[in-house]
C-alpha cells in the first residue's frame, strides 16, 4: 500500500530541482490529481461543468491571485517547492463499477496523489472504497448521501453538507413558514432508486414524523426511467402541500414535462438540488419552474458577504459561459481544500496528505460558501457546512433561508 503512495508523483527534472532548490530536493514538478466524473452519456454536462470548476480552482492555486482563498497568493504549492497541480480526468459513465475500475487505473497507472469526485453518490461509494484500499485520499466534492462518511474510512473527506444537513434545513424552512401562518400539512416524497434517493427519502421520512407532517405520497421510481406517467399521476392524486423530489438531471426534466402533460402543478416544490441545480433542467423546462425552491451550498447573491464569489464566478463563467451553481461551487471549493491539504502535508505520501486534511482549519470567510468553516470530524465530514435555501424567481436564484442570509422572502405558493 505504502509503495503506491510514494510513487504518486511525476518527478520533474531531478538534477535541476536539486541545484535550484536544495531544500526541496524531493519535490515533484507536478502534483497529479485524478478527477472522476460522468464525461459521457446523459450526465455529460455535469462532467463538463465540473471540469471547468476544477480548472478554475487549479488556476487559483497554480497562479497568484489577490483574493481571500486558500493557496491564492502563492504560485503553486509552497510546501512542495511551488509545484503545480495537474489534473487527470476519467469517465465513470454514472456506473459504480466503472468508477471503481477507473479509480484503480488512476491510482496504479497515473500515480495520482488523490482522487476527487464523483457527483453520483453510488459512484462515490465504490470509488472511496478503492481509494481506501490503496491509501489514497478521496475528496468527495459533491455527492451528498449521508451514509458515505459513516463507513469508518480513513481517507474519505467531504467539505460540503450531506442530505441530512440539507433536509434539516428544508424542514427548518417549512417550520418557519408554518410559524408565519402558512398552511403546510402534507408532503409528497419523490425519489430515484439509487443510494442518493434512498438516503434522501429516509432522512425526509424521519424528519416528517418528528415534526408532524403527513406523507401522502411516497414514490420511488427507477432512475433514468423512460416514463414517469404513473408516478406523476400518483403525485397529482395525492396533491401534497409540498413535493420533495430527489432526482438527477434527466429525471428532473422528465418529471416536470410529465407534470405539464398531465395538467399537474404542485402548490410548492422544495428540491434536494441534484438535477434541480443544473442549467440543463432550466434550459429545458425553466418556464414551468418559477418559484421552485432548492436546498443549496451556495448562492451568487451572497457576494456582498463573500467578495471572492464574484472573482471566482467571473473566472468560471469565462470558461463555461454559465454561472457557478450548487454543484460547481462545491467542486471548486473541494479542489481548493484538497490542494491546501497537499500543500500543508509537504508531501504526496497518502498517509501524510490524509493527516494534513484531517487537520484542516479554513475559516468560512476564506471560502465562497456560507459555511462557518472547513474542519473535518473523525469521519471525514465537515460539520460546519451550513446549507441555504434558494428560490428560482424570474430566471434567477434568490437566497430565501435562513433569514440571516436571505436576500428576499420566499414566494409561496410557487
Image (cartoon, rainbow, N blue to C red):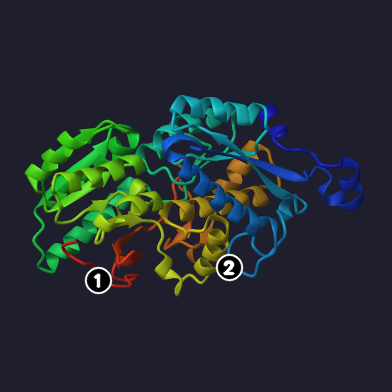
Question: How far from the left and from the top, in percent, is residue 21?
Answer: 86, 52
Instruction: Give the crowd class for mark 1: few <14, some 14-19, many >=20 residues within 10 Å.
Output: few
Q: Which one is in front, 231 or 335? A: 231
Q: Position of residue 156 (x, y in %)?
A: 50, 39
Which residue lies most toward the front here? 261
Q: Does residue 216 sit above or below 66 in this rendering?
A: above
Residue 211 in the image: above or below residue 129: below
Looking at the image, is 177 positioned above or below residue 19? below
Residue topped by disc 2: 68
Q: Which mark is residue 409?
A: 1
Which residue occupies the foreground of this view, 231 or 100? Answer: 231
Q: Position of residue 185 (x, y in %)?
A: 8, 54
Give the quadrant of the C terminus.
bottom left
Disc ID at residue 204: none
Q: On the rendered structure, is 267 left or right of 163?
A: left
Q: Residue at x 81, y 48 (%)?
A: 24
Q: Quadrant of residue 135?
A: top right
Q: Is residue 150 visible?
A: no
| Number of the front mark, 1 or 2 | 1
| Rendered view: 334 above or below 14 | below
Q: Quarter of the image for the N terminus: give it.
A: top right
Q: Residues within 10 Å of mark 2 (few under 14, many from 20)?
A: some
Calculate the distance from the C-alpha at mark 1 to the C-alpha at mark 2. 30 Å
| Viewer-nearest residue: 38 or 340 | 38
Residue 67 screen position, x and y as percent: 60, 68
* N-terminal-most mark, 1 or 2: 2
Label 1 residue SS: loop
Amino acid at each position: 500500500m505504502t509503495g503506491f503512495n510514494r510513487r504518486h508523483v511525476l518527478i520533474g527534472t531531478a538534477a535541476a530541482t536539486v541545484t535550484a532548490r536544495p531544500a526541496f530536493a524531493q519535490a515533484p514538478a507536478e502534483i497529479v490529481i485524478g478527477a472522476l466524473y460522468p464525461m459521457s452519456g446523459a450526465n455529460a454536462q455535469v462532467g463538463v461543468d465540473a471540469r471547468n470548476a476544477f480548472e478554475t480552482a487549479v488556476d487559483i492555486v497554480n497562479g497568484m491571485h489577490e483574493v481571500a482563498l486558500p493557496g491564492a497568493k502563492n504560485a503553486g504549492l509552497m510546501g512542495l517547492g511551488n509545484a503545480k497541480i495537474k489534473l487527470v480526468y476519467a469517465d465513470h459513465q454514472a456506473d459504480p463499477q466503472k468508477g471503481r475500475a477507473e479509480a484503480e487505473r488512476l491510482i496504479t497507472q497515473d500515480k495520482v496523489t488523490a482522487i476527487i469526485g464523483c457527483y453520483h453518490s453510488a459512484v462515490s461509494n465504490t470509488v472511496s472504497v478503492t481509494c481506501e484500499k490503496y491509501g489514497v485520499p478521496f475528496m468527495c466534492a459533491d455527492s451528498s448521501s449521508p451514509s458515505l462518511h459513516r463507513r469508518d474510512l480513513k481517507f474519505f473527506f467531504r467539505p460540503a453538507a450531506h442530505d441530512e444537513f440539507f433536509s434539516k434545513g428544508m424542514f427548518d424552512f417549512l417550520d418557519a413558514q408554518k410559524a408565519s401562518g402558512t398552511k403546510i400539512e402534507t408532503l409528497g416524497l419523490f425519489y430515484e432508486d439509487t443510494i442518493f434517493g434512498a438516503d434522501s427519502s429516509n432522512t425526509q421520512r424521519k424528519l416528517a414524523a418528528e415534526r408532524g407532517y403527513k406523507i401522502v405520497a411516497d414514490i420511488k421510481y427507477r432512475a433514468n426511467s423512460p416514463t414517469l406517467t404513473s408516478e406523476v399521476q400518483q403525485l397529482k392524486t395525492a396533491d401534497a402541500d409540498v413535493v420533495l423530489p430527489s432526482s438527477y438531471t434527466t429525471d428532473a426534466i422528465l418529471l416536470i414535462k410529465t407534470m405539464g402533460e398531465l395538467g399537474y402543478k404542485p402548490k410548492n416544490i422544495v428540491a434536494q438540488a441534484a438535477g434541480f441545480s443544473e442549467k440543463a433542467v432550466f434550459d429545458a423546462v425553466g418556464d414551468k419552474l418559477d418559484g421552485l425552491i432548492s436546498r443549496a451550498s451556495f448562492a451568487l447573491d451572497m457576494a456582498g458577504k463573500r467578495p471572492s464569489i464574484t472573482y471566482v464566478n467571473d473566472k468560471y463563467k469565462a470558461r463555461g459561459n454559465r454561472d457557478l451553481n450548487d454543484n460547481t461551487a462545491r467542486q471548486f471549493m473541494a479542489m481548493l481544500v484538497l490542494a491546501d491539504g497537499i500543500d500543508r502535508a509537504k508531501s504526496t505520501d497518502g498517509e501524510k496528505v490524509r493527516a494534513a486534511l484531517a487537520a484542516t482549519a479554513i475559516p468560512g470567510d476564506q471560502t465562497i460558501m456560507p459555511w462557518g468553516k472547513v474542519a473535518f470530524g473523525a469521519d471525514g465530514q465537515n460539520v460546519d457546512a451550513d446549507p441555504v435555501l434558494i428560490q428560482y424567481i424570474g430566471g434567477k436564484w434568490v437566497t430565501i433561508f435562513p433569514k440571516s442570509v436571505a436576500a428576499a422572502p420566499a414566494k409561496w405558493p410557487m
